[in-house]
Amino acid sequence: MEKKVLYSAVQPSGNLTIGNYTGAIRNWVKLQNEYECYYAIANMHAITVRQEPAELRRRTVELLALYIACGVDPAHCTLYVQSQVPQHAELTWVLNTMTYVGEMERMTQFKDKSAKHAENINMGLMDYPVLMAADILLYQTDIVPVGVDQRQHLEIARDIAVRFNNRYGETFRVPEAYTLKEGAKIASLQEPTKKMSKSDENPNASVYLSDDRDTILRKFRRAVTDSDNRIVAAEDKPGVTNLLNIYSAFSGCTVAEAEKQFEGKGYGDFKLAVGETVADVLAPVQAEQKRLLADKAYLNQVLREGAERAYKAARKMLSKVYRKIGFYQGE
Ligand code: TYM
């Protein structure tokens, strides 16, 4: 039986956080044998906010090394850089003609980013979800593992697919989001009602995948909790709940098991245990990433082969779309 298709991507912008790991990359590894997987480095999405060219280039390769260091296997998955497969931009154009400005204006991330980058509300920022829809729909994707913050974009991708199919006949497979409960929504350590983000200005708010052990322990020590000293997940305890979620995602136990484990303990011990657990998981990933980055020839080969495979699939799909909409492709 043919395997179902899985698609996901991360932007090579800013330092990746533990949220990117638990919400996305970690789940990719779990699913890679069960599905035919495409994992992209979304550099076309990244330029919707200003990027320093040399840094963007460096982060692209670092992100590839990170995927592999986390356990994504290039022998079984297609790893590639989005801009190396031109069909992403081409399909975006077609899908743009069936997406409404009002829908894009209502996207939460567009509103947040417009407020944050008021001096640069460019067309790409607004069009970002359509490019993401093109990414997903080009490969006849069945599932898309993403964190909670990307679910709204996935809904739009589904709407666009259905709209296209209704107008031109069955063409695109309608993708499903795949979100694990633990780790799908990691919050800021300083403002636990906000998501942990690559671009937070407060360096204590986010734990980066590149942080060393001391930094990780320090950030968790400073994490905001509350004054009642009970280690339980509850709506009125967002800080403690977030730490429990992080612990659960990194240790593999459930939140209920974690609550039991820390019953009667103080916040100091709890935060130290969370920090140590995270640091223990990240240390081998960091070492492996470093080793891989010293082997650029290997990384370049992975990207070349990935781009070739992705290109083949994408070209076939785009040609089908062009046929459906009446673009002349020779007789
Ligand atoms: P990006 O680069 O912002 O984030 C990459 C992945 O990490 C997840 N994530 C989180 N999960 C849990 N807690 C958090 N605090 C947290 N922060 C981020 C995100 O949900 C995402 O899964 N537009 C996408 C990249 C993209 C894409 C795609 C994803 C481009 N094309 C096609 C899926 C399919 C983005 O900006 O993710």
Image (spheres, grey):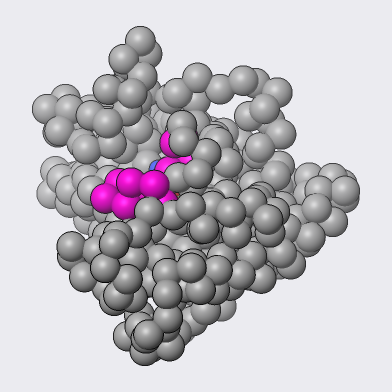
Query: In terms of secondary structure, what is the magenta stretch mainly?
Result: loop
In the rendered view, does 208 fall on the left or right side of 127? Answer: right
In the rendering, at what x and y percent does residue 277 appear?
58, 72
x and y percentages locating residue 303 in the rendered image: 71, 47
Q: Is residue 31 left or right of residue 260?
A: right
The residue depicted at 20 percent of the width and 36 percent of the height is: 107
Tell me the quarter of the picture where residue 176 sits: bottom left
- Pick whichever, 13 or 79, lies toward us: 13
Q: In the rendered structure, which segment of residues is drawn in magenta? A: 187-200
Q: Residue at x 58, y 54 (%)?
A: 218
Q: Which sits in the foreground, 121 or 104?
A: 121
Q: Is residue 192 magenta?
A: yes
Locate the C terminus and report the quarter of the image it occupies.
Answer: top left
Residue 237 pos. (x, y %): 24, 63
* Count of number-bearing discs: 0
Name which residue lies at 46% across and 31% down: 201
Nearer-the-camera pick, 39 or 320: 39
Position above or below: 204 against 331: below
What residue occupies the far top of the structure in this picture? 119
| Residue 174 appears in the picture as rendered | yes
Q: Residue at 84% of width from left, 56% of height from top?
A: 291
Q: Is any atom of residue 249 visible in this view?
A: no
- Residue 323 position, x and y percent, is 33, 40
- Determine whether 202 is above or below 302 in the image: above
- Is 221 magenta? The answer is no
Drawn side of residue 271 relative to residue 95, left or right:
right
141 displayed left or right of 160: right
Q: Nearer the viewer, residue 133 or 280?
A: 280
